[in-house]
Image (spheres, helix red, strand yellow):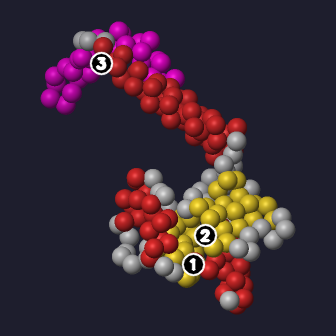
Amino acid sequence: MLQDNENRFVIYQKRKYLMIYIIGCLLFVARGIWIIVNAHSLAFECTVDRAGGRDCFHNPIYYYIAGALDVLLFGILSLPVFYWFINPGLVFYMNEDGFYSKFGFIKWNDVTGISLSKTQSGKYITFKMKKREDASAIVSRLSFIERIFQKTKVKGSPDFTISFLGTGVDIEKVYTEMKKAYEQNNQNI
């Protein structure tokens, strides 16, 4: 949701996208429960392979384990999403001083450029930091997986990408407003 209040933009995660994720997790939990309940009959169902042989486990413990892993994994994965569904998280905030994203609060003075990147998977807003030290400080706050992906980018001050997936906002409108605020800040310097 995009809100314009007193020359600032605030974007929260949309519940519709979180609901789709929750439903997917619950379907896999239900599948795991079904596998556990039907483990004994599944263990003795045989399938014919291409060579004409029969593949059977003959041991329901494999199905109990598979079902339990299904329930455990997708049950645990759905817990934070339930929390985000109740309290939608702040994805992006922008005012005249800078913007807030998963990278923390970034001042306009620390940014060298903003661009709109288009890939097959979607559109992203990309920005670059002026000082390598500032970029390193941002990278140090990222999760382990995000740090790995960030290090695979070009050496020097890396580009940082902001995704608005799951927010339902028009990214080009956000980009236009960011570009205006960035240019306005550069004129004031």
Residue 5 in magenta stretch: no
The x, y position of residue 163, in whole percent, is 57, 61
Badge 3 element: helix
Q: Residues within 10 Å of mark 2 (few under 14, many from 20)?
A: some
* Residue holding disc 2: 106
* Residue holding disc 3: 62
Which residue is drawn at the image coordinates 16% and 24% (left, top)? 52
Q: Determine the image quadrant of residue 26.
A: top right
**Front in this rendered view, residue 152 or 71:** 152
The x, y position of residue 97, in whole percent, is 71, 74
Q: Which mark is residue 111?
A: 1
Q: Count all numbered tags in the image, as a single digit.
A: 3
Q: Which residues lie in the magenta part?
A: 30-57
Q: Which mark is residue 103?
A: none
The x, y position of residue 170, in whole percent, is 69, 65
Sequence-first tag of 2 and 3 = 3
Which residue is drawn at the image coordinates 66% and 68% (left, top)? 99
Badge 2 element: strand
Sequence-first tag of 3 and 1 = 3
**Front in this rendered view, residue 30 or 68:** 68
Horizontally, is 156 left or right of 88 in the view?
left
Residue type pointed to by label 3? Tyr
